[in-house]
Amino acid sequence: MKNKKVQLMCITGVFTALVFVVTAYLHIPTNNGYIHVGDGLIYLAACLLPWPYAMVVGAGGAFLADCLTGFAVWAPGSVIIKALTVLLFSSKKDKVINLRNSLAVLPATIVCAGGYYLYESLIYGNFVSPLAGIPASVTQSVASAIVFIAFGLTADKMKIKSKIYGGNLR
């Protein structure tokens, strides 16, 4: 494609839709929401796309999933948390799965679990009851990390980054 911005916008749109579908429809219900692996696709997008595009994927996919599945109260928190999570990963490396991106799943877990804990504390007006949601948030992050690594290794074998950027990473 001659226009790189158009190509990146198209990839962003596809990833946003994938995050929405995986988050909204492939999940396990919990006491205060659900566990999903949509974050794994957000991590992958963050490793493939420049951060402004990846932030749209994370914030947009999570926003759509929350608003269109009856969890709209979570949408403002999800937009901020998922956009911040993207910043932990790098798209400037030759491969998706590298040391930096592999280690980024650890702070991503802290940002997601901590972010939702704080947001839930605001919603419920206390800092005790949201503690019950932390195990589900950590479980979601671990499952998402597994999906991210599996898809990332596949993307690296397929040389997706060189196909997107033509061997020129910026």
Image (spheres, grey):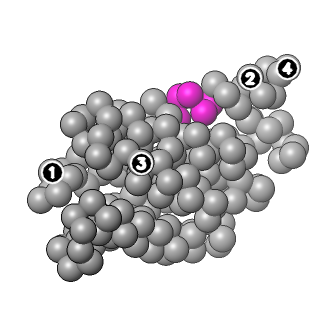
> 86 left or right of 129?
right
Q: Can residue 170 be seen in this view?
A: yes
| Residue corresponding to mark 4 | 2
Amino acid type for the residue under numbered disc 3? Pro
Q: Which quadrant is the N terminus positioned in?
A: top right
Name the residue: 83% across, 22% down.
3
Name the residue: 78% across, 28% down.
5
| Residue corresponding to mark 2 | 6
Amino acid type for the residue under numbered disc 1? Pro
Say which element carries label 4.
loop
Amino acid type for the residue under numbered disc 4? Lys
Q: Distance between the residues labelled 3 and 2?
A: 28 Å
| Residue corresponding to mark 3 | 76
Say which element carries label 2.
helix
Whichever of callouts 3 and 4 sits on the residue coming sooner in the sequence is 4
The residue lying toward the viewer, choosing from 52 and 95, is 52
Q: Where 103 falls versus 5 (above or below)?
A: below
Q: Where is residue 55 in the image (x, y as percent from the top left)?
A: 60, 46
Say which element carries label 3.
helix
Say which element carries label 1.
strand
Query: Which stretch is magenta?
Result: 11-15
Q: How far apart are marks 1 and 3 (CA)?
A: 20 Å
* Residues under numbered marks 1 and 3 in contact, where contact means CB atoms less than 8 Å apart: no
| Residue corresponding to mark 1 | 29
